[in-house]
Image (spheres, grey):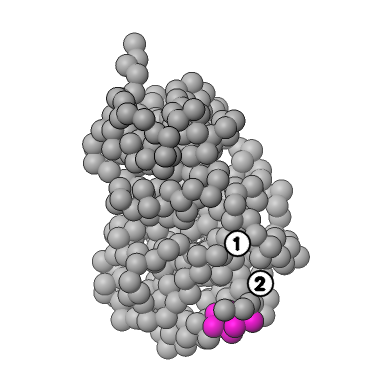
Amino acid sequence: MDRSCERKAQDEQFDAIRRLIEGAQTIAVCAHTSPDGDALGSQLALVELIERTWPGKEVAALLADDDVVPRTYAFLPGSERLVRACAYGASPDLFICVDLSQPGRLADARAVLERARRSAVIDHHPGAEPFWDAGVVRTDAAAAGVIVAEFAQRVAGALTPTMAQCLLCALVTDTGRFQYQNANGEAFRVASMLVDSGASPADVALNVYQSDRLSYVHLCATVMSRITTFEQGKIAYSYATAADLAAAGVPVAECDGLVDLVRVVEGTEVALFLKEVPGGRVRGNLRAKTDRDISGIAREMGGGGHPAAAGFTVEGDIDEALSVVLPKLRALYACAKGTGTFARSAEG
């Protein structure tokens, strides 16, 4: 399908979402569990867009988890209005999923989705079987924020500076400051439009990348000291235990960027970062620097994501998670020999 046909198809899908919004009085908008910059930025921009374009709608911005907004993204306009899904008792006319197309990633908000009369999806992840009444799922989009920006242009013609700021954060974070493989031409065109609409790249950089607490910097040093490689340096991993996070005073919600410490190692093609989370579970982040697809491994582990960026959560501890995921990563390389022992080193 050529670009003009793709654009026409997307516009038709946008119009279907528009009709759902116009026909709803109560609307809940929610992103995935453990929200990142793309999830929160896209969600907040969409909430503002709906309220400005269709005054009088009752719009709720939900957090999927019983948790706080990650400190890194508290600067986003509208973040103060986010409410936990477990505290939202209404049955909305419309539930909109942003940056996800799999109900299993909604955590507490899944119950709200199931109570809703209609549902819509805006996402760029490979999805499951469609469950929505209308939606756009474009895996070639660099971020969900790209799709929300184009939806805003379709229904409103222009973006406010606050919407643009949220969406620039979404785009910058999901492209790794335009360093990841998904930083395509569309991403740069949308970024230019967002800056022209009033977004500040400097504010995004200051709040997301240049305002780490000293305790977080110390945690980074611990994570870097543990980096271990396999397959002649092509695979690198590190980890943080619950005790590490408690000692540093760093909540789980602030740890998304730690995988990038592993990713920067020279010669590494696949990076893995594991962290212990409440409930006796381990959350894993995977990143690929080449065209190797690591999303299949994440799905095998009960998660999902993109070919170059994916994640999963499993029951158990760090050693148990490593014993399962590392053999799968080594199997990506035909030269892998032996199984080895994948327990982390004992520490004094």
Counting from the top left corner in percent of width and height, residue 234 is at 50, 33
The answer to whether residue 247 is visible is: yes
Q: Residues within 10 Å of mark 1 (few under 14, many from 20)?
A: many
Characterize the local packing of mark 2: few (<14), some (14-19) or many (20 or more) Cα atoms within 10 angstroms: many
**Residue at figure coordinates x 68%, y 62% from the top left:** 185
SS for dot 1:
helix
For image coordinates 61% across by 44% down, the residue present is 207
- Residue 245's quadrant in the figure? top left
278 vs 97, left or right, is left
Residue 216 drawn at (x, y percent): 51, 30
x and y, in percent, of residue 267 in the image: 57, 32
How far is mark 2 from mark 1, CA to CA?
10 Å
Mark closest to the chain's N terminus, 2 or 1: 2
87 on left or right of 75:
left
When the figure is inspected, residue 301 is found, relative to residue 52, above or below; the finding is above
Q: Please check the rendered image and state whether residue 57 is part of the magenta-colored stretch, yes or no.
A: no
> Disc 1 designates what residue?
167
Residue range (magenta): 4-10
Q: How many marks?
A: 2
Q: Residue at x 51, y 69 (%)?
A: 138
Front in this rendered view, residue 233 or 111: 233
Name the residue beneath numbered marker 2.
159
Name the secondary structure under disc 2: loop
Q: Quadrant of the C terminus?
A: top left
The residue sitting at 40% across, 58% down in the picture is: 32
Locate the N terminus by quadrant.
Answer: bottom right
Q: Amino acid at mark 1?
A: Leu
